[in-house]
Image: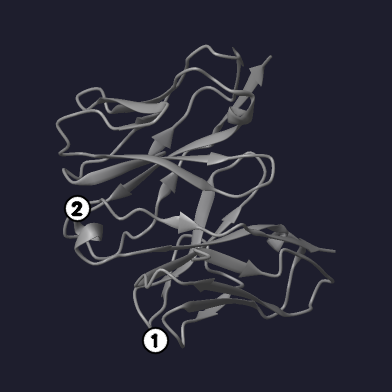
């Protein structure tokens, strides 16, 4: 079963506007982390923001914020005041924690391409 | 502080040839990982290591071998390359340890190696 689902293959946003990227996840583990990465056209994977399953408040990092709704198992990324340099592919990922010893990987969604228009 | 570096950046192989991809990190991270990224998909874990001298299989290990003789280096080998191994390969590292158990273990990625097998 897919652990991370990103339903928006591509989005367009006007410069200076906010954009929300959807991410839903599936896990039965009570302890997990949710991550967002940015992949610009140059190809590198850039870590943006992290949310822990036990965190009481939504994570924020500069213009990035994470809208964490635990009961709905969603972890949407909000980019405020979009800039042309925000044009990239964005990946949501989950790392399950707990006592299981064999699950070390990040499970990635398929990604959402964001294009910022001037 | 270079973070995670990968060599080479690009490589073209013929079917049946062998090669080794080198990953190095200077963050004193315990855990290291090799992922592959195929078009339209997120990253999938090939192999990983939880410490010097240890390696383990990920989701898609067939056709690859790895070694971690030094803490800072993680090598990915292709013994007999196949066209299905055409992909972008990413190395990542993380602190590991207790951060893994609570899901907070952020993985930091290298710039990627674009491999084409003809």
Image quadrant containing the N terminus of chain A: top left
Q: Residue at x 24, y 45 (%)?
A: A32
**Front in this rendered view, residue A56 or A85:** A85
* Sooner in the amino-acid sequence: mark 2 or mark 1: 1
Q: Position of residue A115 (x, y in %)?
A: 64, 22
Chain assignment, label 1:
B
The image quarter in which residue A64 lies: top left
Q: Position of residue A95 (x, y in %)?
A: 32, 49
Q: Read off the residue under disc 1.
A: B53
**Front in this rendered view, residue A46 or B98:** A46
Chain assignment, label 2:
B
Q: Is residue A78 above or below residue B59?
A: above
Q: Is residue A82 above or below residue B108?
A: above
Left or right side of A50 for B59: right
Q: Read off the residue under disc 2.
A: B102
Q: Are marks 2 and 1 on the same chain?
A: yes
């Amino acid at each position: 079963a897919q652990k991370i689902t990103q339903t928006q293959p591509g989005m367009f946003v006007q410069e200076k506007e906010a954009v929300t990227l959807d991410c839903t996840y599936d896990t039965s583990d009570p302890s997990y982390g949710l991550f967002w990465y940015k992949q610009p056209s140059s190809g590198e994977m850039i870590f943006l923001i992290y949310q822990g399953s036990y965190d009481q408040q939504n994570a924020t990092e500069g213009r990035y914020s994470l809208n964490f709704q635990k009961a709905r198992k969603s972890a949407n990324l909000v980019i405020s005041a979009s800039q042309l340099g925000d044009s990239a592919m964005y990946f949501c990922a989950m790392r399950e924690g707990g006592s299981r010893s064999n699950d070390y990987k990040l499970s990635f969604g398929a990604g959402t391409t964001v294009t910022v228009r001037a | 502080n270079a973070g995670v570096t990968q060599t080479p950046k690009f490589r073209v192989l013929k079917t049946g040839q062998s090669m080794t991809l080198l990953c190095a990190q200077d963050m004193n991270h315990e855990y290291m990982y090799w992922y592959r990224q195929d078009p339209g998909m997120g990253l999938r874990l090939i192999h990983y290591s939880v410490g010097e001298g240890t390696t383990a299989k990920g989701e898609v290990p067939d056709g690859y071998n790895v070694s971690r003789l030094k803490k800072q280096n993680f090598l990915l080998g292709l013994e007999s390359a196949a066209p299905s191994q055409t992909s972008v390969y990413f190395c990542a590292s993380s602190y590991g340890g207790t951060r893994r158990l609570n899901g907070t273990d952020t993985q930091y990625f290298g710039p990627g190696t674009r491999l084409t097998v003809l």
